Image (cartoon, rainbow, N blue to C red):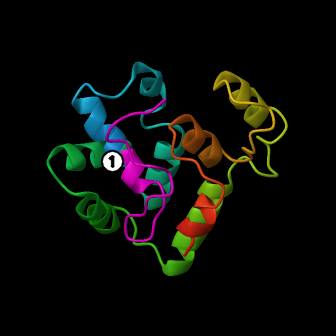
Amino acid sequence: MKIDGISGCYEKTRDMFYFARMCSKIRLHAEGKLPADYFDMLGQGFDGRTCRYLGVSYEAVSHQVLAGMTNEEALAWCHEHGRRLTAEEVLIYNSFMSKRGWRDDETDEFIPAQIGNYGLAEDCGAVTDFDLIEMDEGRWHAEQWREAWK
C-alpha cells in the first residue's frame, strides 16, 4: 500500500539502509498517518534489529526522533549512546538487511506466504523482505537494489 511520507528500505542515512524508514515510521505514527497494519511491527522486526545492532533501544530512538532530530542527528545520537559502526559493520548490516529472505530460513515459507498476503503474483520476482516491502508500497523496480549499493 502506498503511504505518503514513508521512506523506502534502501534509503540511506550515513550509508545505512533502513534507518530512514524506521525514523519515518516513528514520525508518521506520532502524526496519526501510519496505517494500523504497521503498528504491531513498530520496534520489532527490522526496527528492532536495527536498534539492537546499534546498541540502543527503539524507545530511546523514538524519543530522539520525536524531539525533532533529523535522521542523521538521530543516527549520530545512536553512535554516541550505543555503538559507533565501522564501515565493515555497516556493510555487514546492509548486506544482512537487504538480503533477508534470500537463501535463508524465510525462503521456503515466509516469503511465499507474504507474496500471497500482499496479493502479488507468485512470479513477481520478490526474493527478500525488502523486495516485498518495496513492491507493496509501490517503489519497486528491478535494478533498485543495484542502484542502492552504488
Q: Is residue 85 visible?
A: yes
- Of residues 80 and 27, which is closer to you in this image? 27
Is 84 drawn above or below residue 32 in the view shown?
below
Q: Is residue 56 visible?
A: no
Q: Quadrant of residue 115?
A: top right
Disc 1, SS: helix
Q: Position of residue 5 (x, y in %)?
A: 31, 41
Q: Main secondary structure of the magenta part?
A: loop
The reply to whether the magenta stretch includes residue 28 is no
Is 87 drawn above or below residue 138 in the view shown?
below
The reply to whether the magenta stretch includes residue 17 is yes
Q: Residue at x 56, y 78 (%)?
A: 88
Q: Residue at x 74, y 36 (%)?
A: 111
Q: Quadrant of residue 62?
A: top left
- Of residues 25 and 118, which is closer to you in this image? 118
- Of residues 17 and 124, which is closer to you in this image? 124
Instruction: Report the span colored magenta.
Output: 1-22
Q: Sort mark 1 into few (<14), some (14-19) or many (20+) by Cα contacts within 10 Å.
A: many
Q: Along the horizontal axis of the image, is 92 left or right of 112? A: left
Q: Position of residue 8 (x, y in %)?
A: 46, 49
Is 31 drawn above or below residue 139 in the view shown?
above
Residue at the bottom extreme of this rendering: 87
Residue at the right extreme of this rendering: 108
Q: Residue at x 72, y 44 (%)?
A: 126
Residue at the left extreme of this rendering: 67
- Give amino acid for label 1: Cys
Give the labeled residue for mark 1. 23
Q: Position of residue 72 (x, y in %)?
A: 28, 64
Q: Quadrant of residue 146?
A: bottom right
